Image: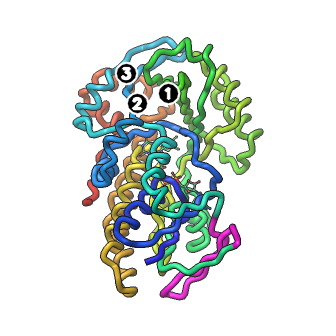
Amino acid sequence: MKLLISGGGIAGLTLAFWLHSHGHEPLVVEKSSRLRDEGYMIDFFGPGYEASEKMSILSEIEGIHYQIPRLAFLGPSGKERFSLGYATLRKNLFGDRHFNFMRGDLERLLYSKIRDRVEVRLGTEVASFEQDGAQVRAKLTDGSTDTFDVLVGADGVHSRIRELAFGPDDSFERPLGYYTAAFIVDDPKIREGVDDAFYTLTVPGRQVAVYPIRGDRLATFFIHKAEHRLYDFSPQMVREELYWAYGGMGWIVPELLERCLDGGGVYFDELAQVEMPSWRRGRVVLVGDACGCVSLLAGQGASMAISGAYTLAEELAEVREEEDIAGALARYEGKLKPPVEKRQQEGRRMARWFVPDNRAILAVRDAAMRMTTSSLASLLLRHRFASGNTVKL
Ligand SMILES: Cc1cc2nc3c(=O)[nH]c(=O)nc-3n(C[C@H](O)[C@H](O)[C@H](O)COP(=O)(O)OP(=O)(O)OC[C@H]3O[C@@H](n4cnc5c(N)ncnc54)[C@H](O)[C@@H]3O)c2cc1C
């Protein structure tokens, strides 16, 4: 079978790996003209961990993993209030079946697994397509046109394939009322003042996290609640929004904001989940964030993207007759959609604890965090680590 995969991110590259292993012929088109930079830190466990084990890449994931000594919780001025030993948490919560790595590092690793076997066209998108029930004829932005058995949209939360096949973004994206930003700071002076912990500074309605990464740099993560909605994501608007949200914060936040704004390379987006009645239409199917974005509040998007890609490829593995394709796509959706929806609910439920609205909730959260054996602490720590219901791989 010939398959066109739009999106060379976590889901798209994993899918290409498995489809090729099953004897199919995938072509990946990726909008970005180069592999992306590190981006942000991902907690990785659950179904994606299991799917990676089946790919035999766990030892390589271990190579990009960050050993975080502790999670440090700061007060508004940057003074450390308490900290939790990460190794113990990792062991208690996941039995050590868990990794932290930068998203870009995982994408590079996945790319290295298919580079010599699968064609990946960087800087290329699907311009348009039409399907007749048996095939999809796609026109690409590099000027070529070709026919495929299946078109897969693995192009993330703002999926273009979803838009072309199912309709505009706002029909399926559920905004959660938060904005997030992430960027990397390469400044020895700022780095000097920060040791090797994963720092979190939370004040009502906003949170900043800072952690060291290879190359003596710092990675940052920002999240804030907002009643307003932004429709303009130009650098100027992002700058205004970040200053509006974090401008009054203490610690090293003012320096971080300055570095972010002179560099570029800032990831900034509204937090949203994607909810759809169906993930497939004829020979077009979606995978990963494109159809089931759980958002960082649920913390298992990358894991679900990998297990979704694995499941889709498994269902397509045995398909040799055209008429079996619809059944394979339906079985994939039937297996993945319920656990994705469960994680979406959990993510929405945990939002108020992740970024508390007021000091009272923040105080309860922090008190619970100090007693890491309490059920609220377990829930909070699992906001990104939630087990949800499992995906049968
Ligand atoms: C700040 C932050 C923290 C997170 N933390 C975690 C975490 O701790 N644990 C976790 O599991 N998940 C986490 N996530 C979620 C996780 O990053 C996503 O769920 C995951 O990346 C989804 O993978 P994907 O391949 O579906 O989409 P993406 O990773 O978004 O990849 C989509 C790819 O498609 C490409 N593309 C886009 N449009 C087009 C187009 N028109 N044509 C061709 N290509 C296109 C993009 O360039 C990209 O390469 C976090 C997300 C954020 C934003």
Residue name at image x 35 percent, y 61 percent:
310
Q: Is residue 125 above or below residue 47?
A: below
Query: What residue is rendered at 54% in x and 33% in y?
Result: 221
Q: Residue at x 38, y 54 (%)?
A: 304
Instruction: Give the left or right position of residue 12, taking residue 314 as reference.
Output: right
Confirm or reject: label 3 Cβ below 8 Å from ligand 1: no
Tag 1 near tag 2, CB within 8 Å: yes
User: Which amino acid, mark 3?
Assistant: Arg
* Marks 1,3: beta carbons within 8 A: no
Helix, strand, or loop for circle 3?
strand
In space, the residues marked 1 and 2 are separated at their CA atoms by 8 Å
The residue under label 2 is 66
Q: Decide whether residue 269 is among the magenta residues.
A: no
Front residue of 335/212: it is 212
Mark earlier in primary sequence (1, 2): 2
- Determine whether the residue tagged by mark 2 lies in a helix, strand or loop: loop
Tell me the residue that label 1 is attached to: 213
Q: Nearer the viewer, residue 292 or 8?
A: 8
Please give the range of residues in magenta: 125-143
- Mark 1 and mark 3: Cα distance apart in space: 14 Å
